[in-house]
Image: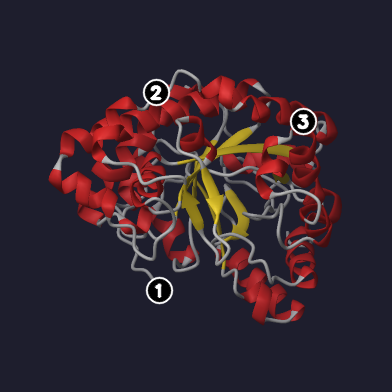
Amino acid sequence: MSSIQLEPALPRSRTEKRNGVASASRTSTRFTNRQRFLNACLSRPVDHPPVWLMRQAGRVLPEYRALKEKFSFLELVQTPELAAVVTLQPIQRFDFDAAILFSDILVVPEALGQKYRFRDQGGIQMEFRLRAEEINRLETNAIVEKLEYVSKALPLIKNALGDRTALLGFAGSPWTLANFMLEGGSAKEHRKGYELFLADRQLFNALCQKLTEAVTIFLEMQIAAGVDAIQIFDSHGGFAPPKDFDALSGRWIKQIIEKLHGQVPVIVFSKGANSSWNELVATGADVISVDWNVRLSELRKCLPPDVAIQGNLNPSLLIHATPREVAAATRRLLNEMRGRDGYIFNLGHGVPPAASLDCIASLVATVRNSQ
């Protein structure tokens, strides 16, 4: 279990959308799923915590697997009508409080000219490994055009959800994208990003600055298309040594959030970065999502009260535990966060492909029945 290291929690100065946020009193008001999710993002009272799951759309669902027999992953992502269908499948089955766009963080490198595919043995393979001399040739001026399929999918999803369910957009963090691009795909330990940082700080910064610009453009496009909130996936946050976390990842996420000007709530999920809470708070994120190696009862004492927390059930429980055991583990997390406004129930990472649908249903029912 990670040791929580953060300065004592103090209220922070937030953007104007924070004005008038209700106090930490409980409420008997019933909300739509969308209202519940957005209230929790802004640390406002709710009737019970909202719930959605990372990777809820896709490989665990039999209806998704049926589609995959007809279409490749990239066809599903790049065809607006199909992306909308896949996004909506878990909502139709489990009625989550939020739907998240079915896509991939690597659409941004692809729009920059570095395509990706899935390896037969698992993991990601980039079309080529980005070399140092190619970094300055990356262009961000075609992001909107090349990712137009996303801006076409989102209104389809939004119209289907109506005002009942929130819609989440997302992107990868510059640090995480840089690692994939420099490694040429998935790796057990992503080292080339940090090696470039140590060898040529100016070039590393140039790469992350371009990725920051590209991600910002992509997220602004999603906001214009109607998303209610966005999540930044810093999936490789744990590969950044804590002493360098801000220079490697935090500062670039902060730039993105600042450029979004508080238009929608922002969630930051930095997997494994469990010694960098101060830096994550400093990004300006409305919500910090945490993996399963953190004790929420400790974390809630440290984070400012106007920073919401998302997480953090161990995804493995959905494979190896019974529905009753998942319900018990879910109640433990709910009890740890009881009385704190600004809690979103989620996993500590994505839904595993072998997850039990009965366990997911048990998780959702337990959250919905909590007070």
Whole-percent x, y for residue 222 in the image: 61, 27
Looking at the rendering, in which quadrant would you find the N terminus?
bottom left
- Report how far apart the C-alphas of labels 3 and 1 lie in the structure: 39 Å
Q: Residue at x 39, y 50 (%)?
A: 184
Q: Which residue is drawn at 57% across and 47% down?
A: 342
Whether residue 73 can be seen here: yes
Along the viewing direction, whichever of 162 and 137 lies nearer the viewer: 137
User: Which one is earlier in the sequence, the residue at label 2 or at label 1?
Assistant: 1
Q: How many residues crowd around disc 3 within 10 Å: few (fewer than 14), some, or many (20 or more)?
A: many
In the rendered view, tell whether residue 149 sits above or below residue 175. above
Q: What residue type is labelled 2?
A: Glu
Query: Considering the numbered disc 3 on the image, is that residue within a helix, a strand or a loop?
Result: helix
Looking at the rendering, in which quadrant would you find the C terminus?
bottom right
Q: Which residue is drawn at 39% across and 61% down?
A: 187
Q: How many residues crowd around disc 2 within 10 Å: few (fewer than 14), some, or many (20 or more)?
A: some
Whole-percent x, y for residue 79 in the image: 73, 35
Along the viewing direction, whichever of 232 and 202 lies nearer the viewer: 202
- Residue highlighted by disc 2: 139
Asked whether, in this view, residue 323 is left or right of residue 221, the answer is right
User: Which one is earlier in the sequence, the residue at label 3 or at label 1?
Assistant: 1
- Residue highlighted by disc 1: 1
Whether residue 165 can be seen here: no
- Report how far apart the C-alphas of labels 2 and 1 lie in the structure: 42 Å
| Extreme-left residue of the structure | 199
Q: Which amino acid does label 3 sit on?
A: Lys
How many numbered circles does the render carry? 3
Pointer 3 and pointer 2: residues touching (CB < 8 Å)? no
Along the viewing direction, whichever of 30 and 206 lies nearer the viewer: 206
Q: Which amino acid does label 1 sit on?
A: Met
Whole-percent x, y for residue 146 in the image: 57, 25
- Residue highlighted by disc 3: 158
